[in-house]
Amino acid sequence: MLMRTDPFRELDRITQQLLGGTGTWSRPSAMPMDAYRQGDEYVIALDLPGVDPDAIEIDVERNMLTVRAERRPVAKGDDVQMELSERPLGVFSRQVMLADTLDTEHIRADYDAGVLTVRVPIAERAKPRKVSIGTGSTRKQISG
């Protein structure tokens, strides 16, 4: 039900990790994610440790789910001298193509312990259902 939109995104993510690149709004870094089905919904879990919830945007346009986040530097005083800085800063983004069988009107999102969890319910029309079988005497004719 979920499709990757860019086959080279993973290569870009690995390259940025090796080169220590910082994501920008025009060229954001990728964020790691898991996606799975749980009951009647799809769950997408994205790692965003250290990101303020106010710095996370979730948009849905047609069937494209876009998550953008920005990890800003922590406030430092004049007397702080940075000895080591390995935590990536900047802009992170991920796009996921949602199938037509998902209900994009009822998406929910929660942020806890650095993980953004997006839940997308399966549309009622896509759920399995029983079809009753009529007999010859109960059929109705539809006039057009």
Image (cartoon, helix red, strand yellow):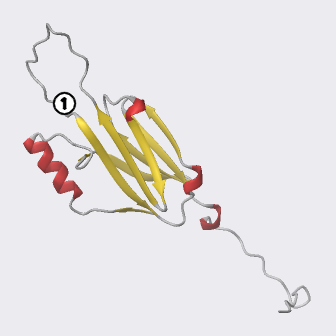
What is the x, y in percent for residue 68? 35, 44
Which residue shows up at 90% across the image and 85% down it? 138
Q: Which image quadrant is residue 79 in?
A: top left
Residue extending farthest right: 137
Residue 98: x, y in percent?
A: 45, 61
Image position, residue 20 (x, y; %): 11, 39
Picture coordinates of residue 121 (x, y %)? 56, 53
Q: Is residue 99 above or below residue 89?
A: below
Q: Nearer the viewer, residue 39 or 10?
A: 10
Q: On the rendered image, what quadrant is the C terminus found in?
A: bottom right
Establish if 115 lies above or below 7: above
Say whether residue 27 is visible.
Answer: yes
Which image quarter: residue 102?
bottom right
For label 1, the SS is: loop
Residue 23 left/right relative to 110: left
Q: Nearer the viewer, residue 34 or 12?
A: 12
Relative placement, left or right, of 67 versus 32 is: right
Disc 1: CA contacts within 10 A as few (<14), some (14-19) or many (>=20): few
- Residue sitting at x 19%, y 30%: 87
- Quarter placement of the N terminus: bottom left
- Identify residue type, mark 1: Arg
Residue at 17 percent of width and 39 percent of height: 22
Q: Which residue in the protein does label 1 denote?
A: 87
Residue 56's place in the image compared with 41, above or below, is: above
